[in-house]
Image: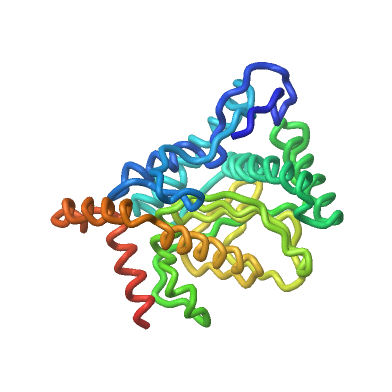
Amino acid sequence: MYKFKKCALCGAETDLELSHIVPKMVMRTLKKTAAGNIRNSENPNIPAQDSEKHYMLCGSCEDLFSEKETYYANTLFHPYIKKEKTKFDYDSKLFYFLTSLSWRSLYLDLIDFIENHVVGIDALEHLISCEKIMKDYLLNSRNDIEAIEHHIFFFDERREITGNTEMAELRPHVTFHRGIISYTFCFEDDGTYGTITNMMGIVLITLYKKGSREKWERTQILNGIGSIEAKDQLISSVVGNEFMNILKTTQSASNSISEKQMAKIVENLKNKADKIKDYPVFQNWLSDRELHNK
């Protein structure tokens, strides 16, 4: 957990608040709808109480973000998770929220990228430039974020996954619908850089730079009034590699759960056997089994 000396957004030297990278309400919803303990990939043998958070924003900047988080929760997140809607109308507050979300991840990842020389100098300079553009937008010092794009991909129920039998075997429904993660990636050879954030099957991909072979249909969120539908979305992108990375990391963590913890999980499921069909994860299990058997 980082504890900065000044606000990462406005630079004020004051007491900082504990800021969640992915909004707290996502973890709250995940825990509320879970059949058992939440576990993360870094330490799957210890139940997770919360998602990633850091002392990085002052109270004023936290408040600046909080209104837009509430808008996202009411306009898109809760209606989608509760299966109340599949088409969502939005205004510029959604674009602001998505910018704030990816900016938080990018800001933190840049610290790691710089300290550990994770990416090449060209990619690093581009990402630093994008972080500054997003920061100025979030502080209302500019009206746009130039060529940076926000895309939302709904990992809805998949009847089949064309051309990727490995993905079908890695329990994608459980992994994406019951997961939270956010990080920045760089495919330097292809020229595609971005931040990917999974919020229980609502996947935000912010593209800082797009390679020539990238194809995104019915996924982009505009800076203004628009609508998006969890239907007929198409992505042909190197970002598919990140989907596989998330699935493999989750599978590896699952395989490393100790016998003691696994016994607790099995016992918990036995105790809830008569009610397990009421939990969202049950349908995810069924969907993954159907995919695996095709």
Q: Residue at x 61, y 58 (%)?
A: 220
Residue that lies at the very extreme toward the front in this rendered image:
259
Q: Quadrant of the N terminus?
A: top right
Give the image quarter of residue 173: bottom left
Q: Position of residue 176 (x, y in %)?
A: 45, 58
Q: How many marks?
A: 0
Whether residue 288 can be seen here = yes
Q: Residue at x 47, y 76 (%)?
A: 161
Q: Position of residue 11 (x, y in %)?
A: 74, 25
Q: Residue at x 61, y 56 (%)?
A: 205
Nearer to me, 100 or 216: 100
The vertical placement of 154 against 143, above or below, is: below
Nearer to me, 130 or 39: 39
Left or right of 266? Residue 292 is right
Left or right of 107? Residue 70 is left
The vertical placement of 206 against 243, above or below, is: above
Left or right of 232? Residue 157 is left
